[in-house]
Amino acid sequence: MSEKLIEVKGLKKYFKVKAGLLHAVDDVNFHIDKGETLGLVGESGCGKSTTGRTLIRLIEADVGEILFDGQDIRKLDKRQLKAFRQNMQMVFQDPYSSLNPRLSIFDLIAEPLMNISEYARDSKRVQERVEELMDTVGLSRRLVNSYPHELDGGRRQRVGIARALSVKPGFLVLDEPVSALDVCIQAQVINLLKRLQQQLDLTYLFISHDLSVVKHISNRIAVMYLGKIVELSDRNTIFQKPQHPYTKALLSAIPIPSIHVNRQRVILKGDVPSPVNPPDGCRFAGRCPYVQDRCRKECPELREVEPGHFVACHF
Amino acid sequence: MEQATKTKRKSGQFSSVMRSLRKNRMAMVGLVILILLILVAIFADFIAPYPYDQQDLMNMRALPSAEHIFGTDEYGRDIFSRVIYGSRLSLVVGFISVGIALVVGGILGAVAGFYGGVLDDIIMRCMDILLAIPQVLLAIAIIASLGNGLINLMIAVGISSIPSYARIVRASVMTIRSEEYIEAARASGTGDAKIIAKHILPNCLAPVIVQVTLGIANAILSCAALSFIGLGITPPSPEWGAMLSGARNYILTYPHLAVYPGLAIVITVLALNLLGDGLRDALDPKLKR
């Protein structure tokens, strides 16, 4: 067994809305080993991004523990948290709105460095570090004084990655880093992320709704539905032997570029129920083709059906 | 090789803004007019042909002539000289009272918009209270409590226009606060004050600049209104707004009394507007060529 870098226990985040409590993240448990990539998939609004943001305390969780190398980061005070930010950074979804349009590429990449006193006093070191980072992520150095609107989406996202890497974090939350890019740029960025992971010994939480992208980069995959993890396993198991009916439906929706494959599509009926005041019982009960009475009454816990494969289903 | 290219940093924000400002012809016109006005204010003693309070009772309300190029007012004082001297008071009053309103209103608005919640409610309700009192009445009350005088006049006009700046800044801060780059800044450990100063305020400059350029004209006129009822600037001192309101009795018979101070205000405001527009564009990297 490899070493656990991140361990999340009983993480909950409810938002107060007019209609009641919105259960964005509801009792989520998982861990990420050092150097691996955990893919977090699910449809829009299922709480994947909220999970990622609570992990690095951009959103404060309501309940639960987030252990980073055994230390509960939810207990850090303001100053400790500021120092701790060096260990975990985030790459955002939209490279157009995640870069301040008024700052040059240099200032953007240097921003996290400026919060570390040893760099803030030494402009030469900042300069060197920014140049080094631009080389690392494959940005040509002549762009250093450009502004974000002058770059294309792929380059912008490279700036976002360079910014996240500037303080040498061990853990990165990648919040749909490629979904705003077109397909061939997606591949470039994914390959860059994979290369960086090996070079710099990084641990990733890769949030995405695109299963083929997640399959390409992840070691293990967690599937989320309405604030809960419904299935968690290593990549191959999920794709070959999905157990949870939601995962099956999700996987059957991946387009296959061939007309010869005879596939069985699992078509789900109905819509995702509202995460505001969700009913007791299994969240998926309303749409599950195998639904039983028990599902409506009792919420299934995540249990290990075989080593390393967790499913939240009664059957 | 790309690697060998030296990455040279820009020579500073100011020079790059000036460079793009210089390419904007209208903005340069505004800047030149403004500089001229400031020079006129500084060297009024040398430019004006007569002292501003010298009366020529033989030539009351004279039409423009070689002797008095803008004519004379109801006490026979040379209007040209008064307009020249008036630039001192008017510019100082305009800039300082807007400066007070901008700094106080801007900080209050930024804090209210950024933190939201109870703090926002408290600040904005205070602004509503200020807004509920008519501006002139509020200024009268402030002058009444602080005492008469030029500085108190500027403070009074400044305070009474705080709410409009606070509202504009708050509104734009609120739209920018939810941008992803604010979250990114927070993720990289940047503190709130720095986020406001570095990320939020530069991005809400555009509406503020427009408000400032119009606000200066407004401040000049508010001062005139107050001077008219005997608060702030006292009669013999020349001030454009005060001259304008003094001339309103003669507007049908001797229009030149009102035209020249009015023109001076119009030119000042126009110059500020042109410069403000250019400045807004020059500060926006997206419009930089």
Image (cartoon, rainbow, N blue to C red):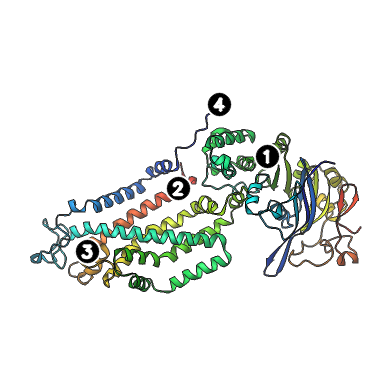
Q: Secondary structure at mark 1?
A: helix
- Residue at position x 84%, y 65% in the image: A281
- Mark 1 or mark 3: which is in front? 3
Q: Secondary structure at mark 2?
A: loop
Residue A3's x, y, as percent?
A: 80, 42
Q: CA–CA distance between discs 1 and 4?
A: 25 Å
**B210 left or right, relative to A30:** left
At label 2, which amino acid type do we have?
Leu
Q: CA–CA distance between discs 1 and 3?
A: 69 Å
Q: A298 and A65: which one is in front?
A: A65
In the rendered image, which residue does mark 1 sit on? Answer: A189
In the rendered image, which residue does mark 3 sit on? Answer: B237
Q: Secondary structure at mark 3?
A: loop
At label 1, which amino acid type do we have?
Val
Location of the N terminus of chain B (image quadrant)? top right
Q: Residues within 10 Å of mark 2 (few under 14, many from 20)?
A: many
Label 4 chain ID: B
Q: Are marks 2 and 1 in contact (CB under 8 Å)?
A: no
